[in-house]
Amino acid sequence: MLKPLHLLTLKAVVHSGSFAIAARDLGYTASAISQQISALEKGTGLVLFEREAHGIRPTAAAHRLVDLGDRVLAALDDLDHQVQELATGVTGRLRLGSFPTAGVRLVPSALSAFVDSHPRAQIQLEEGEPEELVAALGDGDLDIALVYEYGLSPHPWPDGLTHHRLLREDLVLLRARGSGLSAQLPQLSRARWITSREGTAGARSTVRLCAAAGFEAAVAFRSNNYDVVRELVSAGLGVAVVPALGHAPKDTIEATRLTQRSAHRTVTALHRSENSNPLLAAMLLSLGRAVPMDEPFLHPAEPM
């Protein structure tokens, strides 16, 4: 198999017409240059130089091999350049996973900043619930995932993951404006409740909040879409507790922060601790900067 070093040596000898001059230019001894040319002749079966009493003369085969070798060496130079860009994060690919609410409130701004700073990198976005995203991380299908955890429904993440806390959300009680319903949970024992799908962390959190207030929530409607939840509340069909990212101010809805100690949700970015993707740091920075700094019910983490 041809070696790039031998092609470089051949090019230097052909251009200089001398083993000694090529050795000086390349930083080798004349003996080392002679050995490399001999190895190249042996490997190719070609006679590359005519040895004369006062020097050497390149053969037609040597000139042709230099021409062909220039293409190979140029391709190797380009490959080396691309490898350097990949290693430094100029190019490359990053796969981000997000749960839907963060996909609306955080991800677009973060991706915009990331694409501006890394225009030649490839970014892929997948959506799912935390359990799905963590499984994809473990399988190597994602580089980084945005997940959430309710204070009243803690979630132990698997070993081998690095955590970057982005923000803490208050849990917000939503009531139709003018409904006359209290903002205090113990006074809502007879209200109809709207929650996310049964078995979800959000639904469990609401049930546990109500249980701590002394009653069992009468759940009338369920939806994992917070737009639907807000419209149902606005129509006077019940009350709901939603995390801050799932709340959007609306004239027909009264929103009150719950003050119970565990009435919050934490948003965290996870990635495998062994993941060496050079684009990870840039994405984490973009995600941190995408967190709203002055919105009610949202509490950004310390800058990463």
Image: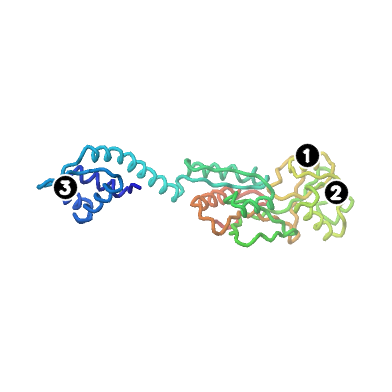
Instruction: Identify which residue is drawn at 19% across, 41% down.
Output: 58
Q: Which mark is residue 219?
A: 2
**Three-letter residue code for mark 1:** Glu
**3D distance between C-alphas at marks 2 and 1:** 16 Å
Q: Which residue is mark 1?
A: 231
**Viewer-side label of 3, 2:** 3
- Name of the residue lying farthest toward the front: 45
The quarter of the picture where residue 179 lies is top right
Position of the C terminus, as image quadrant, is bottom right
Q: Dot 1 lies on which element? A: helix
Instruction: Identify which residue is drawn at 78% across, 39% down.
Output: 231
User: Sequence order check: which comes first, mark 2 or mark 1?
Assistant: 2
Instruction: Identify which residue is drawn at 24% across, 53% down.
Output: 35
User: Is residue 173 depicted above or below 161 in this figure?
Assistant: above
Instruction: Identify which residue is drawn at 30% across, 45% down.
Output: 44
Of 293 and 180, nearer the camera is: 293
**Three-letter residue code for mark 3:** Ser
How busy is the neighbourhood of tag 3: few (under 14 within 10 Å), some, or many (20 plus)? Answer: some
Is 180 displayed left or right of 266 in the figure? Answer: right
**Three-letter residue code for mark 2:** Val
Of 12 and 156, nearer the camera is: 12
- Colour convention of the picture: rainbow
- Name of the residue lying farthest toward the right: 190
Q: Which residue is mark 3?
A: 18
The quarter of the picture where residue 176 lies is top right
What x and y, as percent, mark residue 91?
46, 44
